[in-house]
Amino acid sequence: MRKIVITGGAGFIGSNLCDFFTAKGDQVVCLDNFSTGYRHNIAHLLSNPNFTLVEGDIRNLDVCKQALQGATHVLHQAALGSVPRSIIDPITTNEVNISGFLNMLVATRDAGIKRFVYAASSSTYGDLESLPKVEHQIGKPLSPYAITKYVNELYAENFSKLYGLETIGLRYFNVFGRKQDPNSVYAAVIPKFVQQLIHKQAPIINGDGTFSRDFTYIDNVLQMNELALSVKNEEALNTVYNTAYGENTSLNTMVTVLKELLVQFDPTIQEVEISYGPQRIGDIPHSLASIDKAKKLLNYNPHYSFVAGIKEAVQWYWENLKDK
């Protein structure tokens, strides 16, 4: 039986991973300090004998070592996300995303755990304009957050060479789905817009709406994490993979689709106007991933396009956000 430590396990992606791996029969340890995660995301798991919650901060090395006792695998999801947050507070972003990441690598090494899979980011591509994004070619980072995620990749590669850790980084592209928080100041665009539309508030698109993203449904991310944990091919280890669907959607199209899906619950949502504001500092115009490497080396086969995923997500958002 695997014993998997999931850092940031009470957050959006982390809690979905906790659900996924406990359902598979694995032992799961969730390490979270609840700075951005929520207890209600994992409350239903607390009575599961295969689930353990360790409340603590990855900036504390002793806490990391405690959480990793007896573990066989690590899924490191804990981080302070958000480009705007990192621009406002680069110091805390650096402490969590770099110092915390290094603590987890050291604790993994000292515990004798071989496989360390971590959340990387598409922000690492920075100012690189060419599309689609391929893993071996990046540009200069455009935010403190992007710098921290690139440093994570450098540290992971270094620990692989120095200490023999098996590391795999998953460069997430605009993940969306159930349990995603719409209320944070730094909320992702999809749940934030859905909540605003439900409450007849005009969503504000930064820029003219032509910017595009490779929106990636959460179940594709779960598939990638499982493949990264279990792959045995040596060629597939100690590298990074785009974690996406491989298709981009403009913000204008995204909002149109959201409205079309939400009007089935409330026809008056069709009348909500869309507003446009200034472009955000640090935003890249377009994001589109090549997933050829993941298909070849991990046998990745994403089942959810943006349209397929957003249909499931909107159903969940409506049921969980309409009264909030």
Image: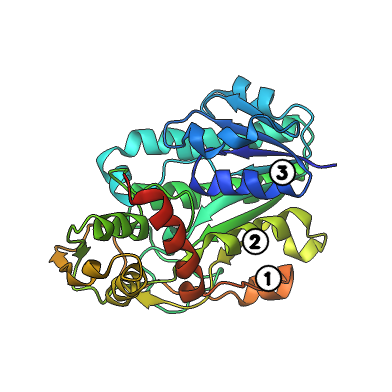
Query: What is the basis of the colouring in this image?
Result: rainbow
Image quarter for residue 28? top right
Provide residue 149's location: percent of width, then percent of height: 47, 50
Instruction: For label 1, count other residues whose C-alpha is less than 10 Å away and answer few (under 14), some (14-19) or many (20+).
Output: some
Q: Is residue 62 above or below residue 291?
A: above
Q: Earlier in the sequence, mark 2 or mark 1?
A: 2
Q: Which residue is mark 3?
A: 22
Helix, strand or loop under label 2: helix
> What amino acid does circle 2 point to?
Met
Q: Which mark is residue 58?
A: none
Mark 2 and mark 1 residues within 8 Å of each other at the beta carbon: yes
Residue at image location 41% in from the left, 38% down from the top: 94
> What amino acid does circle 1 point to?
Tyr
User: Between marks 3 and 2, how big is the CA–CA gap?
Assistant: 16 Å
> What amino acid does circle 3 point to?
Thr
Q: Which mark is residue 224?
A: 2
Instruction: For label 2, count other residues whose C-alpha is less than 10 Å away and answer few (under 14), some (14-19) or many (20+).
Output: many
Residue at image location 28% in from the left, 58% down from the top: 198
Q: Which residue is mark 1?
A: 300
Instruction: For label 3, count other residues whose C-alpha is less than 10 Å away and answer few (under 14), some (14-19) or many (20+).
Output: some
